[in-house]
Amino acid sequence: MKGKIQYNIAEEENYQDGQIIFKEDSSGDWIYVILSGAVEISKNVQGQKYIISVLQAGEVFGELGFIGVTKRTATARAIGNTTLGIIDREFLEKEYNQLSGQFRSIIEVITQRFKEMLDRTCAFTRRAEPRFEKSLSLVYKDREAFFRAYTGNVSSGGLYIKTETPLSPGDQLSLKLQLPGVSDALQIKCEVVWARSPDESLADKPAGMGVKFTQISKKDHQFLRQYLSSVDSEQ
């Protein structure tokens, strides 16, 4: 297409929706270009999945492994049926080696600093509000159905829902949260931030999803803050 970079493609690979292209910390230095479909790039931080980016057709990924000779810094997963082109390795090495030694060193330093910055950013990911380990009854609804569940922990800005069928990060949902001593359930709109499937769960990290509040009334937010304040005073 006009205006698009034409890459030397050595081979094409096809992936189905949800299929892993490569995992974080795995070896590999192939560089890919998305020919069709999309690719989710995510990192695991303390057992939780954080989406870094969703790449579309025409975008390139996997370059850190080639330039920095490092393990994969993130996990790449296909979104929908996706076709990838593997950029010709011999062509890349020929082009790269034609650069001056000084320029190659600068590129490698930039690559390493970017990796360190990404690692530090993820390591410093913290919740702005304290969370309390409390099991509260709730009902949530996605686009299709209602589900009953319980919280694993809760803060004034979000909560963790225990469920064997978590939604995907970025999904929107509405929930009704029942607080002790409050007659009407709090009605909150949320967005899924991270999800942990049964296959990824551990004894101390069961399946579920973390959600952040995107819309809550002042009245309901006040009820929630009062409840959390009472819980905090008891600890």
Image (cartoon, rainbow, N blue to C red):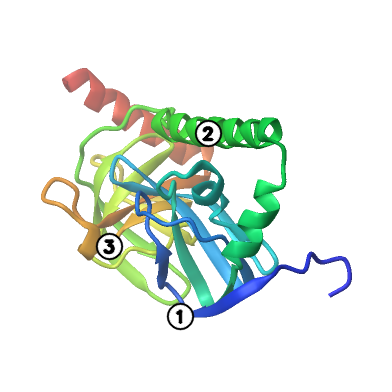
Residue on which the image places disc 1: 16
Residue that appears at 81% across and 66% down: 4
Residue 192 is left or right of residue 2, and the answer is left
Residue that appears at 39% across and 75% down: 145
Q: In the picture shown, does residue 176 fall above or below 128? A: below
- Residue placed furthest toward the left: 203
**Quadrant into which the N terminus falls:** bottom right
Local crowd at mark 2 within 10 Å, few (<14), some, or many (≥20)? some
Residue 203 is left or right of residue 35, and the answer is left
Q: Disc 2 marks which amino acid? A: Gln
Residue on which the image places disc 2: 112
Res 225 quadrant in image: top left
**Labels 3 & 2 near each other (Cβ < 8 A):** no
Q: In the picture shown, does residue 163 fall above or below 24? A: below
Q: CA distance from mark 3 to mark 1?
A: 18 Å
SS category of the residue bearing label 3? loop
**Quadrant into which the C terminus falls:** top left
Q: Disc 1 marks which amino acid? A: Gln
Residue 178 appears in the rendering: yes
SS category of the residue bearing label 2? helix
Q: Nearer the viewer, residue 77 or 230?
A: 77
Q: Position of residue 217 (x, y in %)?
A: 52, 42
Q: Which one is in front in this view, the residue at disc 1 or the one at disc 2? A: 2
Q: Nearer the viewer, residue 228 or 76?
A: 76
Residue on which the image places disc 3: 197
